[in-house]
Structure formats: structure tokens, C-alpha cells
Amino acid sequence: MIDPQAAPNNHGVANIGQAKWMAKSALEALRVKRPDLATLVEADLVGSGKPIVSWAAPVTAEQQAQQRQPLLIGQLKAIAAPFYDRLQAADSAWLAAQATENGLPSTGSHYPWTATTTDDSNKAMATIGQLKVVFSLRFEDLSSGSLVDSDADGLPDDWEAYRFGNLNESPSGDYDFDGMSNADEYSAGCNPALADRADSSPRQLDVFNLTSF
């Protein structure tokens, strides 16, 4: 989700579109490893009255301008909380280990922020660095839970059903004709039904355009 070759600008102000992109990318990464959890997180995160109303592309100039509005600390917390709540319930030890690996101080809860707002006003603008820290979760280390591979092809049934709508695609096939096999797409955390950008490393997740949200 983050290009390691890009020049860092951690003190820059994050915007709404970037937060949605990060949440969408994190959701897709989680879905590869734990589709059950990803479904629960998305149900908590997206919909009327929820942190993200819809993934639908902004159509009007006003909607596009809203995507560029500064992200507030409170909004960042609201978008990230469904991830942390579901991950805490599924594997609290893994989530605690992630905080340790990221060098985060104890916050008194499973969130990467403290309960009090005296040190991080919810109406203050969030930075790029804060957005990156909140979503610095290594899902490749997360337990696979009850993933089943009934046809023993190396591709979990849930992943195949979600991506292809069936369990019949060959691991060596190239569903989206982008030069990566379906097995490589799964291993890299990519979408096998969406051709990866030629200028992106195959080890990166598929890139989402901010304007699409």
C-alpha cells in the first residue's frame, strides 16, 4: 500500500481520499488472508451512517473536492476502529505483537491511540505519518483461521470463490492476462481479476485510484 521508493512526507496533512484508499487497500489485503474478517470489517465500516458511506466513485466536482478535504484525527480513528475491533476479537496476541513490532507505546487499549483526546484532539488534522502508522499491519503474519483448500490447488476456497466466483481456475492460469499467474497473484496479495499496473512491483497490492472513491 505504501511505495517504499517514494520520498516520505510524514508531516504532510492527509486527506479523505487517501484515508479511503488506505482503508480499501487494507481491506483487500486482509481479505486475501482472512476473508471472513474482511467481510465483518467492511460491514462495520461501509454503509449509511458508517465511517465510509460508499466506495462509489465521486461524480460531481463537489464530491471530488470533498475527497481532497483534510482528514481529521477523529475521522481516522473512526475508519480504523473496525479493523482493530475485529482483529482484537480474532487474535489479540497477534495485534499486540504488531504494536510491539511497530514500536508503539502502550495506549491502554488495543487501538494505536489513547482513550483520552488531550494528546490528540479529534478535530485536529491527521498527518500522512499518522495514517501510515494506524494501517501498518502485516496481515501476512495473521493466522489463516479456517481457510480451506478442498481441491488442493494451493488457492484457498474462500479466495477463489471471492475472486473468480468458482473453484475451477488453475493456479498456473492468468485470469487477467497481466503476466502473473493466479498463484502468484494470491501470494503477492494482488487481485487476479484486475491487471496489475506495468509500473508497479508485482509484490505490491493492486493500486486504487483516489478519484474512484
Image (cartoon, rainbow, N blue to C red):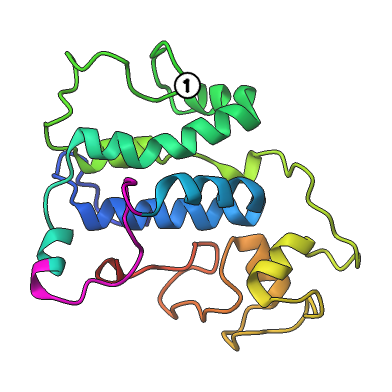
What segment carries the magenta color? 48-62
Task: Give the camera-side residue of 191 and 184.
Answer: 191
Task: Say whether residue 5 is visible.
Answer: no
Tell me where residue 71 sits by quadrant.
top left
Residue 61 location, x and y as percent?
9, 74
Task: Give the camera-side residue of 99 and 117.
Answer: 117
Residue drawn at point x = 48 percent, y = 24 percent = 99
Quadrant of image for the C terminus: bottom left
61 falls in the magenta region: yes
Quadrant of image for the N terminus: bottom left
Task: Say whether residue 47 is visible.
Answer: yes
213 falls in the magenta region: no
Residue 45 location, x and y as percent?
41, 47
Tell me where residue 81 sits by quadrant.
top left
Q: Is residue 35 above or below residue 103?
A: below
Identify the secondary structure beneath mark 1: loop
Q: Main secondary structure of the magenta part?
A: loop
Residue 169 location, x and y as percent?
77, 80
Q: Is residue 102 above or below residue 43?
A: above
Q: Is residue 184 left or right of residue 126?
A: right
Residue drawn at point x = 39 percent, y = 51 percent = 23
Residue drawn at point x = 82 percent, y = 80 percent = 168
| Residue type (three-letter) at the residue carrying disc 1 | His
Residue 140 location, x and y as percent?
63, 46
**Which residue position holds label 1?**
110
Q: Is residue 137 left or right of residue 55?
A: right
